[in-house]
Amino acid sequence: MDRRQALQNVALLLGGTIVGGSLFLQGCKSETAGADAALLTEDQIKYLDEVAETILPKTNTPGAKEAAVGAFMAVMVKDCYTKEQQDVFVKGLADIEKRSEAEFKNGFLKITPEQRTTLLTALDKEQKEYQEKKEKDKPSHYFRMMKELTLLGFFTSKPGATQALRYIAVPGKYEGCVDYKKGDRAWA
């Protein structure tokens, strides 16, 4: 093979890699993810922050609201969920509000933290029962989605990973067996 042929082959290989890579990444996006189309409004994102804060409240460590979990949920639902899952999730926000009005005669944002906890605890029990009985191809219960996204968003955020978990920015050597004392925080 001469030099010219080798350069053509390398150019073809690199060009295919670049074009193939961009096509692969475009294929990862949800078909409902428009260029600038937002699935959830700013008010709904603030609402999700309050739901997440009820699930993971601020204590001696930051809460879910400080980790901006509502915005994280909005991105994940828009970019990673199917249309059917998105519909279940958005309808779930309206259902929480409806249940809050029915049970406490006030919207979710206006009820006390104790009432929020009571409402979400009932939803958690409901979602567990739903998950046990649901068909394999059906989407999860909306509260399960919210709870999973809350945990994922919080523990992968800077406040969650550095303040709620034990964190070493640049770890030293690998130690496969480290003593764990009851009550120690998990490692990030």
Image (cartoon, rainbow, N blue to C red):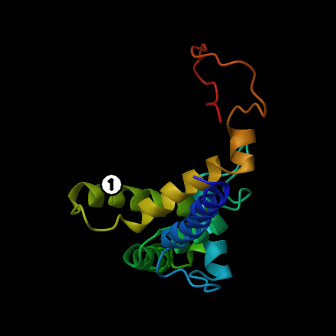
Corner quadrant of residue 168: top right
Residue lying furthest right? 170
Say how many tags the image has.
1
Relative image position of residue 107 (x, y in whole percent): 56, 78
* 85 shown above or below 72: below
* 119 shown above or below 30: above
* 20 shown above or below 178: below
Q: Residue at x 63, y 16 (%)?
A: 175
User: Mark 1 = which residue?
Assistant: 128
Corner quadrant of residue 65: bottom right
Q: Residue at x 64, y 31 (%)?
A: 187
Q: Is residue 49 visible?
A: no
Bin the neighbour count of mark 1 within 10 Å (Cα to Cα): few under 14, some 14-19, many 20 and up: some
Say what secondary structure mark 1 lies in: helix
Q: Is residue 121 left or right of residue 2?
A: left
Q: Is residue 103 visible?
A: yes
Relative image position of residue 123 (x, y in whole percent): 41, 62
Residue lying furthest front? 2
Which corner quadrant holds the C terminus? Answer: top right
Corner quadrant of residue 22: bottom right
* 122 shown above or below 182: below
Q: Is residue 123 left or right of residue 150?
A: left
Q: Amino acid at mark 1?
A: Lys
Q: Nearer the viewer, residue 14 or 187?
A: 14
Q: Nearer the viewer, residue 112 or 54?
A: 54
Q: Nearer the viewer, residue 81 or 48?
A: 81
Q: Residue at x 73, y 33 (%)?
A: 167
Relative image position of residue 53 (x, y in whole percent): 63, 58
Relative image position of residue 86 (x, y in whole percent): 45, 76
